[in-house]
Image (cartoon, rainbow, N blue to C red):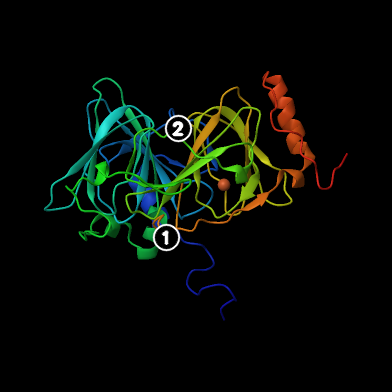
């Protein structure tokens, strides 16, 4: 007789997913957490697939999207890559170039530097080059490899299929020089961002803190990104949504609270080079405690091309519905840092006094 909920033969022991099996077989350092303090100094190891050093960062207890940290030695390059999952690259440090092509067609290339963002079109061939003979390059890439591997169940298939997605990309036709298109008041469709650290962002009153927020859809891929900035002396409203957002801190100093309803928050302190990723429907809230604006880039799963994308509706906690302790502890910390609190004390719906 088979117990309810148990599949005969498996003896109730969960087996590794296809993605987890692939992850182990890659033989590179693997980081599983909700937060990594410093991507610049994260320890990497030789990654045979890339011909350079790297690590897999698999945050927030999930197998939807993951992240790869890649370091290219001075004057060197990665091996040629191509795969049936999407990847969006953020350049943490260094400068170089990437060449992209489809078999039988001329190639394209982009030159990038610290702060650049780009995304190889699906299943095209590409190769990264470090353009500096003295300094290494470090790249951070968010991919949807986990969900695609678990769908097809054979990781290697994803690296060995020759289909050309002509509807998304035709190599050699100026794809990466094409003009960026602003499709709404705060949403761009573009194939290359030269420097997200200085990109002009749009007002976003809904998230509080007098902040800015701009969204990006790149290379006709379904993964998306958004960049947000908020001023000193302020913090953003808490919210929660689906898992998979990788929040990379680009500038500033502060902390975030992460919590599930009814539980005590976990605090993570961040600065340039930190990354955090809330779990499925885990509340998160970002606090600027420094004297400069705080800016982050969130790389995450999307639904469709931005021209069709209607956005997702996170559940948000308005300031007046917060636990008053959130504001009090934030204000104390700002005072300790010599930073004036700009955000007025909320008028709480139910004020504890
Ligand atoms: Fe969020």
Mark 1 CB in 8 Å range of ligand 1?
no
Residue under the image location 74 percent in, 35 percent down: 327
Is residue 268 visible from the viewing direction of this image? Answer: no
Question: In the displayed structure, would residue 182 be above or below residue 138?
Answer: below
Q: Which residue is mark 1?
A: 308
Q: Nearer the viewer, residue 161 or 187?
A: 187
Q: Residue placed farthest to the left in the image?
A: 104
Query: Callout 2: few (<14), some (14-19), or many (20+) C-alpha neighbours within 10 Å?
Result: some
Q: Which residue is mark 2?
A: 39
Question: In the displayed structure, would residue 129 be above or below residue 242?
Answer: above
Query: Callout 1: few (<14), some (14-19), or many (20+) C-alpha neighbours within 10 Å?
Result: few
Residue under the image location 62 percent in, 33 percent down: 255
Circle 2 SS class: loop
Is residue 270 visible from the viewing direction of this image? Answer: yes
Spatial CA distance of label 1 from label 2 is 33 Å
- Which quadrant does the C terminus fall into? top right
Residue 343, percent across and down?
70, 32
Quarter of image, res 109? top left
Residue under the image location 13 percent in, 47 percent down: 106
N-terminal-most mark, 1 or 2? 2
In this picture, residue 242 sits left or right of residue 346: left
Circle 1 SS class: loop
- Which quadrant does the N terminus fall into? bottom right
């Amino acid at each position: 007789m088979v117990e309810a909920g148990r599949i005969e033969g498996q003896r109730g022991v969960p087996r590794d997913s296809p993605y987890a099996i692939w992850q182990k077989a890659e033989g590179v350092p693997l980081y599983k957490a909700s937060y990594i303090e410093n991507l610049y100094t994260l320890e990497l190891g030789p990654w045979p697939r890339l011909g350079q050093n790297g690590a897999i960062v698999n945050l927030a207890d999930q197998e939807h999207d993951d992240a790869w940290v890649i370091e290219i030695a001075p004057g060197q390059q990665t091996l040629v890559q191509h795969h049936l999952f999407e990847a969006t690259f953020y350049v943490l440090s260094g400068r170089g170039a990437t060449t992209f092509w489809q078999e039988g067609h001329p190639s394209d290339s982009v030159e990038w530097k610290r702060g650049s963002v780009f995304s190889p079109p699906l299943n095209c061939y590409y190769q990264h080059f470090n353009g500096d003979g003295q300094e290494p390059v470090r790249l951070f890439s968010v991919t949807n490899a986990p969900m695609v591997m678990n769908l097809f169940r054979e990781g290697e298939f994803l690296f060995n299929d020759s289909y050309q997605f002509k509807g998304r990309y035709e190599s050699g036709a100026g794809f990466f020089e094409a003009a960026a298109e602003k499709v709404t008041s705060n949403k761009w469709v573009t194939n290359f961002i030269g420097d997200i650290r200085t990109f002009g962002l749009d007002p976003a009153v809904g998230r509080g803190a007098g902040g800015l927020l701009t969204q990006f859809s790149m290379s006709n891929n379904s993964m998306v990104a958004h960049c947000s900035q908020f001023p000193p002396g302020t913090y953003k409203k808490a919210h929660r949504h689906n898992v998979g957002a990788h929040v990379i801190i680009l500038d500033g100093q502060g902390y975030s609270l992460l919590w599930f309803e009814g539980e005590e928050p976990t605090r993570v302190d961040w600065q340039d080079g930190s990354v955090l990723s809330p779990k499925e429907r885990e509340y998160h809230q970002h606090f600027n405690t420094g004297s400069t604006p705080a800016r982050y880039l969130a790389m995450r799963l999307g639904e469709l091309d931005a021209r069709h994308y209607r956005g997702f509706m996170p559940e948000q906690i308005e300031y007046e519905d917060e636990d008053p302790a959130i504001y009090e502890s934030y204000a104390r910390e700002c005072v300790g840092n010599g930073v004036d609190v700009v955000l007025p004390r909320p008028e709480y719906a139910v004020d504890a006094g």
